[in-house]
Amino acid sequence: MLLVISPAKSLDFSIQKNIEGTSIPPFLNESKLLVERLRQFRTEELSKLMNISAKLAELNYERFVKWHLPFNLDNAKPAIFVFKGDVYQGMDIESFSNEDIEFANRHLRILSGLYGVLKPLDLIQEYRLEMGTKLENRKGKNLYEFWGDKITTEINKAIEQSSGEKVLINLASNEYFKSIQKKKLNYEVITPVFKDYKNGQYKIISFFAKKARGMMSRFIIQNKIEKAEDIKAFNLADYHFNQELSKDKEWVFTR
């Protein structure tokens, strides 16, 4: 069984602890091509391209200038420890044991605009590049065309090599999951959906749903779940599986 999640815009590279088992992302040559393309943009152009403030554009311009190969523990950090958005708050990596981290490294993948696919312990350097960015490149007009079927091929391989049921649990946002070409995916996809009761009906509230995706990831990893059916027992933060609202491959959890 394999889980996929989105990355985060918020990063923290101040981690000092020694992490064993780190690895190099599989698509660094592709990442280098993207960085070289992004270095062609002035800060004001980056601001417009990425729809970010001038201050953030300056920060990311500097990040792309500094980005360089080869990656090592002096200039890069393991992905799972540096992403700090809502999903990762829900995941709470600080609560993971070494065994949890090893399980996550086998069963979790992070989709990324710059890196394609990341294992939790893959080393990354600071960046911001959302998958939906309309960055024209030598392979097309956006990042979906740039990555083509590379991400899908890597996900297929990861599921094939994983233990347990051969199924993909989609905990990524639509923006990132679109980078996986479902027609070329060899395995079934199950998408958990998280809804809160508000104004007389169940709704997806983005902030809570993002945190819930992280909590679901933590639940699966810390309980070493390898069968999709077992995730229906998810009960963190008062969420429970809702059979009535669920569809065949879209499992709804409500509170």
Image (cartoon, grey):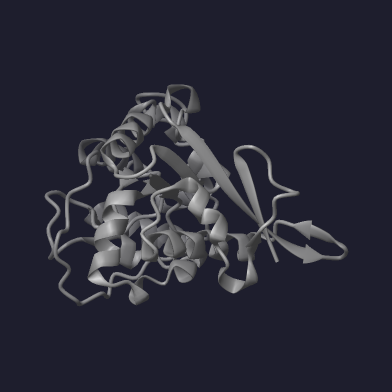
User: Which of the 4 image quadrants contains residue 40?
Assistant: top left
Residue beneath the point at 50% across and 45% down: 170
Whole-percent x, y for residue 82 in the image: 33, 66
Residue 172 in sight in this render = no
Mark count: 0
Residue 73 in sight in this render = yes
**Quarter of the rendering occupied by the C terminus:** bottom right
Q: In the figure, 226 relative to 28: above or below?
A: below
Q: Is residue 187 left or right of residue 252?
A: left
Q: Is residue 242 left or right of residue 48?
A: right
Q: In the figure, 46 relative to 197: above or below?
A: above
**Quarter of the rendering occupied by the N terminus:** top left
Whole-percent x, y for residue 26 in the image: 22, 40
Q: Is residue 188 left or right of residue 82?
A: right
Residue beneath the point at 49% across and 43% down: 176
Q: Nearer the viewer, residue 87 or 50?
A: 87
Whole-percent x, y for residue 240 in the image: 64, 63
Q: Nearer the viewer, residue 103 or 108?
A: 103
Q: Nearer the viewer, residue 16 or 95?
A: 95
Residue beneath the point at 38% across and 31% down: 152
Q: Is residue 144 left or right of residue 19?
A: right
User: Which of the 4 image quadrants contains residue 143?
Assistant: top left
Residue beneath the point at 38% across and 37% down: 166
User: Which of the 4 image quadrants contains residue 191?
Assistant: top right
Whole-percent x, y for residue 222 in the image: 38, 66
Q: In the figure, 254 relative to 140: above or below?
A: below
Residue found at the far right of this picture = 200
